[in-house]
């Protein structure tokens, strides 16, 4: 393995999935979040994800114990001091991410590569607040991380070939397929996926079809594993809105305007699965 000690910032949906997959490949992980509560929740999610893999006979109970033993948790960023790669997977907010990158730059060894799992924000911008911009790379995993085969690799303007190659190799070692994309708003996956989800929300908003029928249309009519509204709830409506805003502001075209119904749902705190309500109800 090209990296021996990997840090992950954020124990949420993406952070805990990344920590799990890295630990499943024999690498030590330090998973950091701002509260013990978030860390406990993240570890619980990893346990139940491993249990699902055991059920599908893709993992043994012994391997599960090994995975968990490789993950250390902390609320202190200073605990990344021995990491050779840190993957940031915090909330999709520019100011928050810039702050994290400034701090990572201070605490991580000079040789360490700093990666971001951002789904839409400029890698170039994050690289620019560090003293090692050539060692900053975008490493965009898909949700749920243990099941999805893709990692979208993003080169900031400053990213060196060497850093990019190391990250590509690492992703391949994790069993993922790595593709290379330019650092443009929302990169490739979300540039295509989010306008589709946003359009599905417009179809609902304009009363063209019901939630269930929109999802059936796309599942049965185009063989997608999940309908777009189920997928939006799965990803998180706040994340979908944040990505549409990045597209709208970054590319300036009205076709990227977030659907007003999506904005309202987020204002209501109806964020999808994680809040118990989105286009579907998950309470109880
Ligand atoms: N770890 C974590 N979650 C798991 C899991 C594991 N080991 N195994 C299954 N899941 C989740 C599923 O999401 C779902 O949740 P639920 O039981 O609570 O309803 C459930 O577990 C389904 O499990 P199944 O075993 O029945 O499902 P399948 O294995 O048949 O398929 C799937 C699940 C792979 C998620 C499939 O539905 C799928 O491919 N969906 C589309 C996912 C997708 O498009 N992801 C990309 C989103 S975009 C993105 O991530 C980019 C970001 O920047 C926004």
Image (cartoon, rainbow, N blue to C red):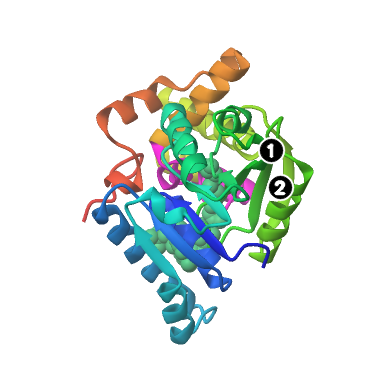
How far across and down, in percent of the image, does residue 96 sit? 41, 32
Number of numbered discs overlaid on the protein picture: 2
Say which mark, if any, is on residue 163: 2
Residue 134: image tag: 1
Q: Dot 1: within a 10 Å radius of its alpha carbon, few (fewer than 14), some, or many (20 or more) residues? A: many
Circle 2: element type: helix
Is 79 situated above or below 261?
below
Image location (x, y in percent) of residue 135: 65, 42
The residue lying toward the viewer, choosing from 274 and 30, is 30
Mark 1 falls on what kind of element?
helix
Image: magenta residue range: 216-237
Numbered badge on residue 59: none
The answer to whether residue 38 is above or below residue 43 is: above
For the point 44% across and 39% down, the residue is 103
- Majority SS type along the magenta span: helix
Q: Is residue 170 above or below residue 51?
A: above
């Amino acid at each position: 393995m090209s990296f021996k000690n990997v840090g992950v910032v954020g124990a949420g949906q993406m952070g805990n999935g990344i920590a799990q997959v890295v630990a499943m490949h024999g690498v030590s992980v330090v998973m950091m979040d701002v509260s013990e509560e978030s860390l406990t929740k993240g570890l619980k999610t990893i346990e139940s994800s491993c249990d699902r893999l055991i059920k599908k006979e893709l993992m043994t109970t012994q391997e599960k114990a090994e995975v968990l033993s490789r993950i250390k948790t902390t609320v202190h960023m200073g605990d990344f001091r021995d990491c050779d790669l840190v993957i940031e997977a915090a909330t999709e907010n520019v100011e928050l991410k810039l702050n994290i990158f400034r701090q990572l730059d201070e605490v991580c060894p000079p040789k360490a590569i700093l990666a971001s799992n951002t789904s839409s924000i400029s890698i170039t911008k994050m690289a620019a607040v560090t003293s090692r911009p050539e060692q900053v790379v975008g490493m965009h995993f898909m949700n749920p991380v243990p099941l999805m085969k893709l990692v979208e690799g993003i080169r900031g303007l400053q990213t060196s070939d060497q850093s990019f190659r190391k990250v590509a190799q690492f992703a391949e070692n994790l069993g993922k397929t790595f593709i290379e994309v330019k650092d443009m708003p929302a990169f490739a996956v979300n540039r295509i996926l989010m306008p589709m989800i946003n359009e599905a929300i417009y179809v609902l908003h304009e009363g063209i079809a019901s939630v269930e029928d929109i999802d059936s249309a796309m599942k049965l009519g185009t063989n997608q594993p999940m309908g777009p509204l189920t997928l939006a709830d799965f990803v998180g409506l706040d994340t979908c809105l944040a990505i549409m805003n990045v597209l709208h502001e970054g590319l300036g075209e009205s076709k990227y305007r977030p659907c007003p119904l999506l904005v309202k749902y987020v204002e209501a705190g109806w964020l999808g699965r994680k809040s118990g309500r989105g286009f579907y109800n998950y309470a109880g």
